[in-house]
């Protein structure tokens, strides 16, 4: 590793200051730009994490209390084939199908919101 440059302390109009060479100043400005870019990326990642957290909370709610496909159709149209025809399988299969349909709608909604 290189040695860190020691700042040159000066007094300017009675106030303590630090003198930089042109190269040191340009390096400082470049570092500030890099930090600014990294901060912007961190903000984007934080927003994505919040959206993902919200999605997981909503998925957890769906799993705890699955919706009926017909009830879901009133909330938002879906492509669930079971919403157009009665469930032929047992009640458990029907609930699983409705849950899958509700999860698909929820995932599409969150994906569209992220775009």
Image (cartoon, helix red, strand yellow):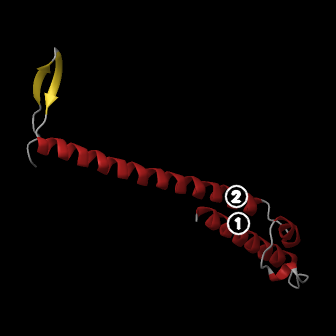
- 13 shown above or below 96: above
Which of the 4 quarters of the picture holds residue 88? bottom right
Q: In the image, 61: left or right of 2?
A: right
Mark 2 or mark 1: name the one nearer the start of the chain.
2
Q: Label 1 near label 2: C-beta < 8 Å?
A: yes
Label 1: which residue?
Answer: 106
Residue 82 drawn at (x, y percent) = 84, 81
Relative image position of residue 91 (x, y in whole percent):
87, 76
Specify whether 43 is left or right of 5. right
Q: Residues within 10 Å of mark 2 (few under 14, many from 20)?
A: some
On the image, the x and y values in percent for residue 52 come to: 58, 58
Q: Nearer the viewer, residue 87 or 72?
A: 72
Residue at 42 percent across and 54 percent down: it is 41
Q: Is residue 34 left or right of residue 103?
A: left
Q: Is residue 45 above or below residue 74?
A: above
Tell me how many marks there are.
Answer: 2
Mark drawn on residue 58: 2
Q: Return the residue nearer the eye: 33 or 90.
A: 33
Front residue of 14/33: it is 14
| Residue lying at the far right of the rendered structure | 86
């Amino acid at each position: 590793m290189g040695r860190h440059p020691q700042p040159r302390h000066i007094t300017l109009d009675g106030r303590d200051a630090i003198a930089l060479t042109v190269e040191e100043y340009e390096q400082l400005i470049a570092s500030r730009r890099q930090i600014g870019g990294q901060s912007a990326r961190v903000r984007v990642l934080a927003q994505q994490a919040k959206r993902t957290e919200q999605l997981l909370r909503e998925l957890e709610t769906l799993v705890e209390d699955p919706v009926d496909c017909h009830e879901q159709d009133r909330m938002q149209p879906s492509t669930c084939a079971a919403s157009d025809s009665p469930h032929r399988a047992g009640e458990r299969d029907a609930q699983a199908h409705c849950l899958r349909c509700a999860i698909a709608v929820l995932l599409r909604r969150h994906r569209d919101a992220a775009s």
